[in-house]
Amino acid sequence: MSDVALMLRQVRYTNKAFWRNPASAFFTFAFPLMFLVIFTSLLGKGTVPIGGVLIKQSSYYVAAMATFSVITASYTNIAMSVTYQRDSGILKRVRGTPLPGWAYLVGRVIHALLVAVLLVALTAAFGAVFYGADLPTGALLAKFVLVVVAGGASFAALGLATTAIVPNADAGPAVVNAIILPLLFLSGIFIPLGDNSPAWIRTVGTIFPVKHFADAMRAGFYGRPFRFEWHDVLILLLWGLGGLVAAARFFSWEPRK
Amino acid sequence: MSEVVIEVVGLRKSYGDVEAVRGIDLRVRRGEVFALLGPNGAGKTTTVEILEGYRERTAGEVRVLGHDPARRDRALRERVGIVLQSTGIDPYLTVRETVELYARYFPHPRDVDEVIDLVGLTDKRDARVIRLSGGQQRRLDVAIALAGDPELLFLDEPTTGFDPGARRNAWEIVRNLASLGKTVFLTTHYMDEAENLANRVAVIARGEIVAEGPPGLLGGRHLAETLIRFRVRSGASGPPAVPGAVVRSNGLVEVRTETPTSTLHELTGWAMAGGFELDGLEVTRPTLEDVYLELTGGEAGAE
């Protein structure tokens, strides 16, 4: 079997195991939808000015929660599940077989991407049915899918890099949430960042990849009046590349002592 | 003599200031079941993980099936099966799926059902890993290591934490492996495990090999000596007239001898001539356990 075939086989087995933990699978999918309902109910009545245009908050949240879905499914999920596999010794066992390490990890990343795509589709469909969000079509859809894949891959690479600073599986949720939750707030995922939000928050947002990803997702999802900026995708991919380099350098296949 | 499968010369491994392995030599030939026996912390796992390619050595030469394991050649990993001291398995796959998953990583895998049968998990074939007992998971570990039909198997403390029944089962599996012509390198801190399974044993203590040989001959001269012990009541005419006799406190006499028949003859002749009894007369040969305790400085059984 070629290495690529082995890697795809790895995706299949990962998927099999994923669905056999129904509680985990259910909440992976329910989480972003739950947030979508909560935020839209709490804050979805008004409008928010972005680039001088007033945007319905409910529309804003459908794209924001689609962004959140991708980050949850790739970054959070990869960082936590790979740490767990490292600490339980699964990675060490795989390392002793002829399977190339990259085939194992890429297999997991591709599975995470598939979950992310499914989650985005679910969130978008939910938004269309309950909040009257418009779904992207044609060229816009192609752009949107591209952003989803670029974001999923970049955040998965950052997730792999994050395992290097998580000392053990018990600390996984604490470390991962401490990194991602503030960024989600500072990047306008949970509470819209309008033109009148504090300057320092918008500055912080432009440094990290979450805001660029969210902006690209929103522009890809709605088209006008949002402007699709290629530099958002570029910065996102640079972060992903950085994550990949860090992971290649610091990734550990064995529990950290 | 058959082909050398593992060759280790002057192997050293330091962790910071601590030298865990201090210059050991090993040679394992094809078809052997070789046991590295020693107390915890003696350097067993460090040694086996260097052979498996998980650790880099500080100094020395290591060859496994002609490869340097530190280079982690795929060609080597295709020929080796590894049972680590403790490793996880995806809890949501079944026994059969798990063995199948690992088997395909190898170019010439064994038949999956045959491997499952070999480790006695046929009844649990379709059970998820999460439902297996500890002993069953350990058998699955062995099945995974066998799935690629390796020439050489590493078993790092395969029965630690097992109850006696599970240990017997595990031993039976290792004997099966030997009968398949596999070379087996196992580490253990159980004397009886090495004695029961291995053709050859090396005893490691504090990072050094302190004895090596077939289990029956381990310790060489120590085992050849017989210990004769008795007490003499007052009235005996002086110390016994045999070489090597040592008088301890309370009149306890110990004689170590390589010729127990003639020594005993002289002793009993001496007692009868003097008209007294050799109280509590004992003739014992040291067990492998005694030899082991002596070699490892009494650290045996340290759990």
Image (cartoon, coloured by chain):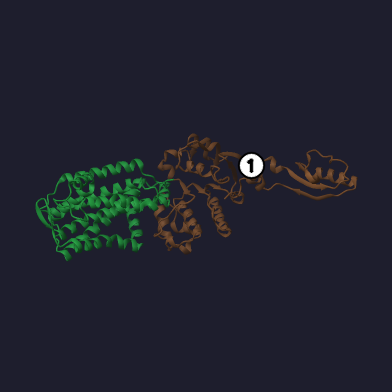
Chain colours: A green, B brown
Q: Is residue B253 visible?
A: no
> Which quadrant would residue A24 be assigned to in this image?
bottom left
Residue at position x 49%, y 56% from top?
B139
- Most foreground residue, A132 or B112: A132
* Figure check: A205 above or below B95: above
- The kind of secondary structure element at disc 1 is helix
* Residue located farthest toward the bottom when viewing the structure as drawn: A130
Q: On the picture, is B209 further left or further right than B60?
A: right
* Figure check: B44 above or below A40: above
Residue at position x 43%, y 49% from top?
A93
Residue A197 rendering spot, x and y as whole percentages: 16, 50
Residue A203 rendering spot, x and y as whole percentages: 19, 45
* Mark 1 neighbour density, 10 Å: few (under 14) some (14–19) many (20 or more): some
Residue B104 rendering spot, x and y as whole percentages: 39, 52
Q: Output the chain of dot 1.
A: B
Q: Is residue A63 visible?
A: yes
Tell me how many marks there are.
1
> Which quadrant would residue B294 be assigned to in this image?
top right
Residue A248 rendering spot, x and y as whole percentages: 33, 42
Residue picked out by circle 1: B295
The quadrant in which the N terminus of chain B is found is top right
Tag 1: residue type? Leu
